Image: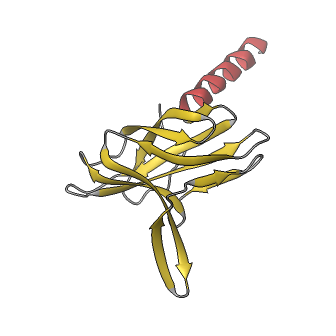
Amino acid sequence: MKLSFLTSALVLALVTGAAAHDFKVGALVIDHPWSRATPKGAAVAGGYMKITNTGTTPDRLTGGTTEAAKKFEIHEMKMEGSVMKMRELSGGIEIPPGATVELKPGSYHIMMTTLARPFAKGDFVKASLIFEKAGKVDIEFAVDAAGGGGAKEHKH
């Protein structure tokens, strides 16, 4: 019985680790970057994730790059009166110490434009994020179904 329990615990640890899709640079933890599948011929894709600052000083997401698109921009969507507006954040997004900032549909997000190829469900799109203090970190966006919402069950 003791061996069975230890075996189960080991398998659970391995499965949990295999499903993890997190990246770290300095005091910043990037949790589960994801995107949605795009139709053939689509020119744009969004990128989403949670960024947690475990440190004691603020940092700022200032940009990034990917070979999957010509442009990689940080955007914000917000309501202005009764109209939803989207704009590029040229100064990036501040990540306060001890805080988590979520990039999600309808809010802060990465906008990748002039795609090199469509994003297909199950793909991983390589990219780099650039932070003001922590520097550069290589990540991968897990691609969900076109209507997907960033489920954490990706195999990586």
| Residue 127: percent from left, percent from top | 42, 38
Determine the residue located farthest toward the top in the rendered image: 3
Closer-to-camera residue (32/94): 94
The image position of residue 95, as x and y in percent, is 67, 50
Rendered location of residue 137, percent (x, y): 52, 33
Q: Residue at x 54, y 82 (%)?
A: 80
Colouring used for the render: secondary structure
In the rendered view, tell whether residue 8 sits above or below residue 144. Answer: above
Image position of 53 (left or right of 82)? right
Q: Is residue 5 left or right of residue 50?
A: right
In the rendered image, residue 130, in percent from the top left (x then y), is placed at: 52, 40
Q: Residue furthest bottom?
A: 82
Q: Residue at x 61, y 30 (%)?
A: 16
Can residue 92 be seen here?
yes
Is 100 placed left or right of 70 in the picture? right
Q: Nearer the viewer, residue 145 or 106?
A: 106
Quadrant of the rendered structure where residue 52 is? top right
| Residue occupying the point 74% across, 50% down | 99
Picture mark count: 0
Residue at (36% x, 55% y) in the render = 45
Question: Where, quadrant-wise, is the N terminus in this rendering?
Answer: top right
Q: Is residue 20 visible?
A: no
- Which residue is more in the foreground, 94 or 17? 94
Q: Is residue 88 above or below residue 84?
A: above
In the rendered view, does 123 fall on the left or right side of 129?
left
